Image: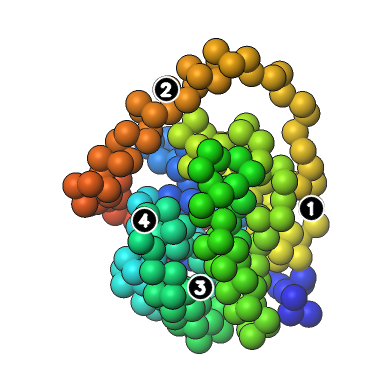
Amino acid sequence: MDNDTDLRRFASYVAVGDSFTEGMCDELLPGGQYRGWADRVAAALAAEQAGGEGFRYANLAVRGKLIGQIHAEQIDRAAAMGGELVTLAGGLNDVLRPGCDIEQVEKLLGSCAEALLADGATVVMFTSTDPARRMAGGARLLPTILRMKAYVEGLAKQHPRLLVVDLFSAPCFDDRRLWDEDRLHLSPEGHRRVAAAVLEALGRPAGFDWRAPLPPAAPRGRAEQLRADLHWLRLHLGPWIGRRLTGRSSGDGRPPKRAELLPYEG
């Protein structure tokens, strides 16, 4: 970590990415938007300013976006805003699709990071959680997830202002209670922990141990698990496959969550 990072107070923050950064499946805010870990980080950083004044926040993330779309639609806009802090998450939607061109994903992800770093921002990136430990069929994704993890960590070694939040190595994310019932998006508790992880990477004192396991959950019986699996297949996996087959995305026509770098009012 850069020696100044622990002491730096950020006056502006721009978040870019997909549903992870948009905040899907966190608690709802007035107006119907999800809160999300990025909003939680913004609230904490705004509180560091005198009276919370002067801090500005933008969130350009849109659910369903592939890394090529993030690169084309969000990065130049984010760079032009000149945010002192930028969080960058993307590529997992590509990895989930059959036939993912991982070399192209890495190329675009690296290009995104370079463009954001060029204007002097501190950039925070992420490693994915381990899908093999919590999802049926997740093992097929593991080689690509591990390759992306190594790539992001390699970028951080090249750039002192690029920080990495390592979610892969945190077994707490194996717990289904950190995930929404769709099994793809974080629950409110999951968002709370990612926000704490980002703040820790920025040198803030930890308010709690975000890596700590939750108290033991009551075990599910076979019948209950079967009902949960059938519910997931019908309400989540089926529609997801349908969108893939028809070339649609959950983010089609959806504007960015917070399109301008404006004063934050939590």
Residue type at mark 4 is Pro
Residue at 74% x, 59% y: name it: 200
Q: Position of residue 232 (x, y in %)?
A: 43, 28
Identify the image quadrant of residue 163: bottom right
User: With respect to residue 242, does 101 lie above or below?
Assistant: below
Q: Which residue is mark 2?
A: 231
Q: Position of residue 20 (x, y in %)?
A: 48, 51
Question: How far apart are the alpha carbons under marks 4 and 3?
Answer: 35 Å
The secondary element bearing badge 1 is classed as loop
Q: Position of residue 103 (x, y in %)?
A: 44, 75
Would you say 138 lies left or right of 111 here? Answer: right
Density class for disc 2 (Cα within 10 Å; few <14, some 14-19, many ≥20) is some
**Toward the viewer: 147 or 191?**
147
Q: Earlier in the sequence, mark 1 or mark 4?
A: 4
Residue at 62% x, 32% y: name it: 177
Question: How far apart are the alpha carbons under marks 3 and 1?
Answer: 24 Å
Question: How far apart are the alpha carbons under marks 2 and 1?
Answer: 37 Å
Residue at 66% x, 36% y: name it: 175
Residue type at mark 2 is His
Q: Earlier in the sequence, mark 2 or mark 1?
A: 1
Question: How far apart are the alpha carbons under marks 3 and 2?
Answer: 42 Å
Residue 83 tag number: 3
User: With respect to residue 69, does 192 lie above or below?
Assistant: above
Residue 98 tag number: 4
Q: Quadrant of the N terminus?
A: bottom right
Identify the image quadrant of residue 166: bottom right
Residue type at mark 1 is Ala
Density class for disc 1 (Cα within 10 Å; few <14, some 14-19, many ≥20) is few
The secondary element bearing badge 2 is classed as helix
Q: Which residue is mark 1?
A: 206
Residue 178 tag number: none
